[in-house]
Image (spheres, rainbow, N blue to C red):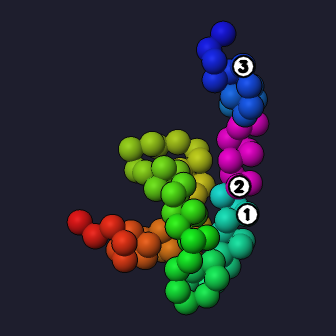
């Protein structure tokens, strides 16, 4: 048995894992609401923590159900884009 299937969320069947992940994306989106950032008009460490996960979920190369779901959260996508533009300019 693969080590990732021996513990934690790796033991969940794929449909349950996707459902749980969608709930986490929904919770982030709900906490953000209509705001620019999680705690107001300026980014905080909360935004940095959210941004640490957002690109992995939103990365276009991963054409899966979770990415498609996350992409529907327009303000969450916009917040991730703002963080990238402000702190990780190309």
Horizontal arrangement in the rendering, residue 5 relative to residue 80 (left or right): right
The residue that disc 1 covers is 27
Q: Residue at x 57, y 58 (%)?
A: 70
CA–CA distance in space, label 1 to label 3: 27 Å
CA–CA distance in space, label 3 to label 2: 22 Å
Provide residue 83's location: percent of width, then percent of height.
Answer: 44, 72
* Residue numbers of the magenta segment: 16-24
Depth check, mark 3 against mark 2: the one in front is 3
Pointer 1 and pointer 2: residues touching (CB < 8 Å)?
A: yes
Is residue 45 among what the camera can see? yes
Figure quadrant of residue 9? top right
- Which mark identifies residue 87? none
The residue that disc 3 covers is 6
Figure quadrant of residue 12? top right
Provide residue 42's location: percent of width, then percent of height.
Answer: 52, 86
Q: Residue at x 71, y 73 (%)?
A: 31
Vertical order, 6 against 41 (above or below) = above
Q: Residue at x 68, y 47 (%)?
A: 21
In primary-sequence order, the first of circles 3 and 2 is 3
Residue at the far top in the pictured view? 1
Does 89 lie within the magenta span?
Answer: no
Vertical order, 62 against 3 (above or below) = below
Vertical order, 7 against 29 (above or below) = above
Q: Mark 3: give few (<14), some (14-19) or many (20+) Cα within 10 Å.
A: few
Main SS, magenta residues: helix
Q: Kindly state the secondary structure of the residue where label 3 is placed.
A: loop
Residue at the far left in the pictured view? 90
The residue that disc 2 covers is 24
CA–CA distance in space, label 1 to label 2: 5 Å
């Amino acid at each position: 048995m693969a080590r990732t299937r021996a513990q934690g969320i790796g033991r969940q069947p794929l449909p349950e894992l996707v459902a749980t992940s969608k709930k986490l994306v929904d919770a982030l989106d709900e906490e953000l609401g209509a705001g620019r950032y999680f705690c107001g008009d300026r980014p905080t460490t909360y935004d940095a923590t959210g941004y640490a996960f957002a690109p992995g979920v939103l990365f276009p190369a991963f054409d899966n159900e979770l990415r498609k779901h996350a992409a529907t959260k327009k303000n969450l996508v916009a917040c991730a884009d703002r963080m990238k533009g402000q702190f990780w300019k190309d």
